[in-house]
Amino acid sequence: MKIFNFLFSVFIFSSVIFHANAHNVTHDSRSIIIDGNHRIILSGSIHYPRSTAQMWPDLIRKAKEGGLDAVKTYVFWNAHEPVRRQYDFSGNLDLVRFLKTIRDEGLYAILRIGPYACAEWNYGGFPMWLHNMPGVSFRTKNDVFMNEMKNFTSLIVDMVKRERLFASQGGHIILAQIENEYGNVMKPYGEDGKSYINWCAQMADSLDIGVPWIMCQQAGAPKPMLETCNGWYCDQYKPKDPNTPKMWTENWTGWFKSWGSADPLRTAEDLAYSVARFFQKGGTLQNYYMYHGGTNFGRTSGGPYMTTTYDYNAPLDEYGNLNQPKWGHLKQLHDVLHSIEYTLTHGDVETQKIDNSVTATIYQTNDKSSCFLSNTNTTTDATVNFGGINYFIPAWSISILPDCREEAYNTAKVYAQTWMMVKKSNKAEDEPSCLKWAWRPELIESASVQGKGDVSVNKIVDQKDMANDASDYLWYMTSVELTKDDLMLNGTVTLRVADTGHVLHAFVNGKYIGSQWAKYGNHVAYVFEKSIKLLPGKNLISLLSVTVGFKNYEAMFDLVGAGIASPVELVLKNAGNETIVKDLSSNKWAYKTGLDGISNKYFDPSKSSPKWVSDQVPINRNFTWYKTTFKAPLGNKPVVVDLLGLGKGMAWVNGHSLGRYWPSYIADKQLCKTKACDYRGRYSDKKCLSKCGEPTQRWYHVPRSFLNDGENTLVLFEEFGGNPSSVQFQTVEVGSVCVNAYQGKVVQLSCHDRPISKIEFASFGHPQGVCGSFEKGECESDVDAISILEKECVGKELCSFKISEDKFGKAYCDARRLAVEAVCDDFTF
Ligand SMILES: *[C@@H]1O[C@H](CO)[C@@H](O)[C@H](O)[C@H]1NC(C)=O
Ligand SMILES: *[C@@H]1O[C@H](CO)[C@@H](O)[C@H](O)[C@H]1NC(C)=O
Ligand SMILES: *[C@@H]1O[C@H](CO)[C@@H](O)[C@H](O)[C@H]1NC(C)=O
Ligand SMILES: *[C@@H]1O[C@H](CO)[C@@H](O)[C@H](O)[C@H]1NC(C)=O
Ligand SMILES: *[C@@H]1O[C@H](CO)[C@@H](O)[C@H](O)[C@H]1NC(C)=O
Ligand SMILES: *[C@@H]1O[C@H](CO)[C@@H](O)[C@H](O)[C@H]1NC(C)=O
Ligand SMILES: CC(=O)N[C@H]1CO[C@H](CO)[C@@H](O)[C@@H]1O
C-alpha cells in the first residue's frame, strides 16, 4: 500500500510537471494553433553545418531581429553517420547545441529530419555506405532502406526527446518533417512509391513526438502528415485536405550556384511580393529557403558541381552580414503581418476587384478589418481609390493596410537601406604584403607509373561503389601488353574513355596525356579521346577520376553514375578508317582511392612534415601542394581568402577544410542576357544574374573560429596548376550605404559600427540608377540635398530623417523619391 502510494504520487508529480511546461501544437484549416492561439508563423532556414557553432547565436539573433518566429533546418545524415553506426555530433554538427541556441534566442524550431535533404548537399544527405549495402533501393518499399531510415530517424528523435526539445515536452520544436519533396519524383517509383510514403507516415507517427509532422510537396499526404508547398511563389497553392492550413515550407530567397553559373539576385521587392501575396491568399506559415545559406565546407557540396559558397542571396549573406535591403525590407513586412495575426487567422475573407489590375482582399472580424491591395500587373503602376482614399500601388506590388485605411507597407516601396559590401586587406601590423610560400609535389608516381592499387577487379566499377565517398579522387589503372610486331605500334592509337561527367586526368606510362570535364555545371557524360604512343612490352594506363559532389536531386538520383564508365577502348585510326583494336573494359583494373598527400594529411599543421621546399616555388604546376603562414586580419569582421590565380583544388586553414576551390572556372558569359534587373514579373533562376565572365567563386570564407591570434597556416592542394602569388586574406565589411525611397517616411542611414564619412550622392525627385551609380533624373528639387545630409549624417554611426518636401524642397512630379549614397569611414576596427 505504501509503495503504491509512493508510485502514485511520483506519477502525479511528474505528469503535473509535464503538463505545466508542455505546449499544445495543433492545427485547423486556417493555421497552426499553439496553446490555443492561431498563429502566423514566419520561419527561415539556417543549416547548422553551413556555418560554425560560434556563428550560430549571431545568425539566430539576426533572424529574430529580422522578425522571424522560427528557424528551420534539415538534419544531414551523411555528416552525422559517415560510417554505419559511427556517429559525429561534434563542432558544427552539434544538432542539439544548434537547437538549444534557437531556443535560447527565443525562437521556435522546425526540424526537417528527412532524412533525405536534397539541399544541394552531397548525395542529398544520404551516406554512401547505404548505397553500398547489398539489396538496398532508395526511397521506395525496400526493407534495407526502410530499416536504416527508421534507425537514423529514431536516433534523432530520441536525441531530441532526451533533451525535451519538442514543444509537447515543453521545448520549442513545433513541427517536424519526414521525407522531402517526394511528391515531385514519386511517379517513377510506381506502387512501391505509394507504399513507401504511407510507411514513412506510419513510421513517423509511431515515434510519438507530440507535434505535427509535415511532408512538403506531397499533395494529399497520408494522414496525419500535413502537406506543404515549396517554390518561388505559393499563392495559388491549395492543400488537398481542406482541414490542412496553407503552409509554404520553402520560399526560395534566391538560388544556389554551380561551377560555371552566375551570381543570383532575387530582389527584395519580388521576395516581399511573394510573401505578401501568400498571406493575402490565406497562407499562415511561411519559411525562407534560405534565410542564411552559408558555406559548403569540406566535401559537403552536392552536385555535381555545386559551389563551395551557398550564399543563396539570402537575407543574411554567406558570412552572416545583413544582406540589405532584403533583410530590412522583410523585417518591416514581418512586423506588419504579425500586427494583423488575429484578423488573418480569424477574419472572414472577401475579395473586391478595384480595377483591371488591382484587387483588394479584406479580412474582417467583429471589431477589426485588415486589407491587402495587390497590383499583379507586371508593367503598369496604379493609383486607385479604396474606401475614399487614394493609394499608389506600383506594378507587381502589394500594399498592406492593417486597419484598411493606412498603408503600413508596400512590397515595392523599399525604405530599408542598401549595403554595398566591400573586401578590404586589413593586415596585422608586421604582416608582409605578400605571403611566403613553400611547396611539395603530390606523389602520383605510385599510381601513374607503377599502377599500384588497393583492389583489383576485372571490370570498370562506378566511383560511388569503389571509393565509398572517402575522397574525391579515385585511380583506375590497367595495363596493355604489346609484342614487337603489334599493329598498334605502327598507326595512330587513340585512347577513348567514357566518363560520367566529372573531372578526368589521363596518364600513359606515367606521362600525363590530358584532362577533361563537363563544362558549365552540366552533368553531361562525355567521351575523352587522345592519341597516345604505346611501346613494345607492358604499357600502363592510369586514369585519375575526380568527383565534384554527388548528385542530390531527381528520381533515383542515387543511381546516377560517377567516375569512369564503360567502355574504355584503344582505337586505331588509319586513313579515315577506325578500328577498335582493344576494349579494355573487362581488363584487370587496379583501384586506389585518394591521394597520397590527403591520406598523409599534408594540410594538418600539427603533423610535422619535413619535405616542404621554400625555394623556386613553382607556378602552373598541377598536383602541387602549397603552404604559407599568416596572421589573422585585424578586427572582428568576417574573413575571406582571395584565391584568384589558382586553378582547382581544396584549401585548409589550420587543418579545417574551407571546401573545394575552382576560381579558374569562369561563369558563362551567355547567362547574363539583360543588364538591368527588373523586380517586376515572375522570378526564376535565369533572371537578374550578374558576374558573368568572372570566376564563379573567387573568395572563400574563413570563419573566425578557424583562426588563432598567433600564426595560422593555409595549405592548398592545386590539382590543375595555378599561381598562389596573389592570394590574400581580406575582411568583408560595409563600404557604402544607400537609400532610395518614396517621400513621406522616416529612413535610416547607418554604416553598422563605423561613422559615415561622406555623402557621395543625394537627390530628391526622380533619381535614376541603383546604389553605387545613382544619377539625377528629370524633375529634381533644386535644394542641395547633399549639404543637408552632410550636416545631418557625416561623423555619425546612424542618422535618421523624414523624406519630405519641407526638408528636400519641391519637385514638380508624382511619386517623388530621395536617393542617397553615403560612404562609410575607412578605419578598420
Ligand atoms: C490542444 O488544442 C486543441 C485545439 O486547439 C484542443 O482541442 C485540445 O484539447 C488541446 N489539448 C490539450 C492537451 O490541451
Ligand atoms: C540502430 O541499429 C542498431 C543495430 O545496427 C541498433 O543497435 C540500434 O538500437 C538501432 N537504433 C535505433 C534508434 O533504432
Ligand atoms: C497591364 O496593364 C496594361 C494596361 O492596363 C494592360 O495593357 C496589360 O495587358 C496588363 N498586363 C498584365 C500582365 O496584366
Ligand atoms: C609498320 O609500317 C611499316 C611502314 O609503313 C611497315 O613496313 C611495317 O610492316 C608495319 N608494321 C606492322 C607491324 O604493321
Ligand atoms: C577502309 O575500310 C574499308 C572497309 O573495311 C576498306 O574497303 C578500305 O580499303 C579501307 N581503306 C583504307 C584506306 O584502308
Ligand atoms: C599538368 O602538368 C603537365 C606537365 O607539367 C602539363 O603538361 C599538363 O598540361 C598539366 N595538366 C593540367 C590539367 O593542367
Ligand atoms: C512548387 C515548385 O515551384 N516547384 C519547383 C521546384 O523547383 C524545380 C526546379 O526549379 C521546379 O521544376 C519545380 O516546379
Image (spheres, rainbow, N blue to C red):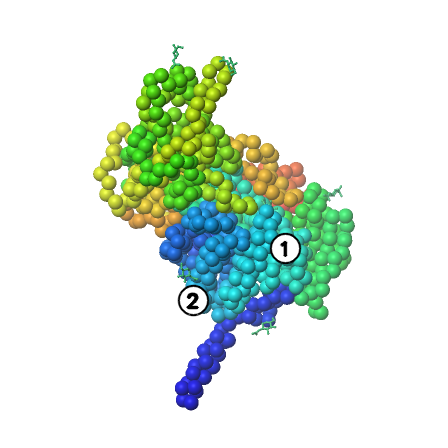
> Which residue shows up at 38% across the image and 25% down it?
513
Q: Nearer the viewer, residue 610 or 510?
A: 510
The answer to whether residue 491 is above or below residue 523 is above
The kind of residue tagged 1 is Ala
Helix, strand or loop for disc 2: loop
The answer to whether residue 106 is above or below residue 824 is below
Residue 577: percent from the left, percent from the top?
50, 17
The kind of residue tagged 2 is Glu
Which residue is the extreme one toward the bottom? Answer: 1
Residue 533: percent from the left, percent from the top?
37, 20
Q: Nearer the viewer, residue 236 or 654?
A: 236
Quarter of the image with the N terminus in it? bottom left
Q: Is residue 254 left or right of residue 755?
A: right
Helix, strand or loop for disc 1: loop
Of the numbered discs 1 and 2, the one sitting upstream in the chain is: 2
Q: Which mark is residue 219?
A: 1
The residue pinned by badge 2 equals 163
> Which residue shows up at 31% across the image and 49% down it?
708
Label 1 vs label 2: CA separation?
33 Å
In this view of the protein, can residue 328 be seen by the observer? no
